[in-house]
Amino acid sequence: MPGWQLARAQAMPERSGPWAYREPAPGTDRTMQMATTPAAEDASVWFLLACDRARLNAALMHLASLPFDVAPESAIVLRFAGHPDVTVGMLPINENQLSIEDAAARRLLPLIIESERMVVSVSDSEGRAHDYTFSLQPNGLALAGIVRDCWDDR
């Protein structure tokens, strides 16, 4: 395979169910794995998990810019069927990314692994809630590297 085709193939994410994901290429020293799934309501909104050197991060991302201003003191509410709502602190990174606090991302991973879907609710600066539904299954292939390298269930 010519070099440019190999580079392009390595740049393209893998797909499994609703997830697009990327693991380091064999033989490289890269340690980051990422998996992302789109919102049912808006294909420009994605839920992202990223694992880098045993550090797990989660974020709500928009391809361009979130269509509302986020209240600085807002939290993100996550809903999983059969479980109580989970409220987590968030940090607006820029106009298109809301990062979930690191410790909360680790606590969420078991719910993400076992649940069919998740609804993420974010309040705007005027107090209106914006809900996004994410399909989470199947996730075995997409989350395998993240579970292996970033989640300790002990």
Image: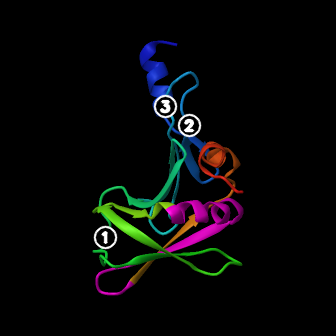
* Secondary element at image label 2: loop
- Camera-nearest residue between 98 and 16: 98
Mark linked to residue 23? 2
For label 3, the residue is 30
Camera-nearest residue between 5 and 89: 89
Which of labels 3 and 2 is toward the front? Answer: 3
Residue identified by numbered label 1: 67
Dot 3 amino acid type: Arg
Q: Earlier in the sequence, mark 3 or mark 2?
A: 2
Secondary structure of residue under mark 3: loop
Image x and y of residue 54, in percent: 55, 45
First in residue order: circle 3 vs circle 1: 3
**What residue is rendered at 54% in x and 32% in y?**
24
| Span of residues in magenta | 103-128
Dot 1 amino acid type = Pro
Quadrant in the picture for residue 125: bottom left
- Tell me the mark number nearer the camera, choosing from 2 and 1: 2
Q: Mark 3, residues whose alpha carbon is within 10 Å: few (<14), some, or many (≥20)?
A: few
Q: Position of residue 1 (x, y in %)?
A: 52, 13
Residue at x 63% of width, y 52% of height: 151
Number of labels in the image equals 3
- Residue pushed farthest bottom? 127
Q: For residue 124, which numbered disc appears in the image?
A: none
Q: Is residue 42 above or below residue 23?
A: below
- From this view, report whether residue 104 is shown above or below residue 15: below
Q: Is 79 situated above or below 49?
A: below
Mark 3 to mark 2 CA distance (whole Å): 9 Å
Number of other residues with Cα within 10 Å of mark 2, as a class: few under 14, some 14 to 19, many 20 or more: many
Q: Is residue 116 magenta?
A: yes
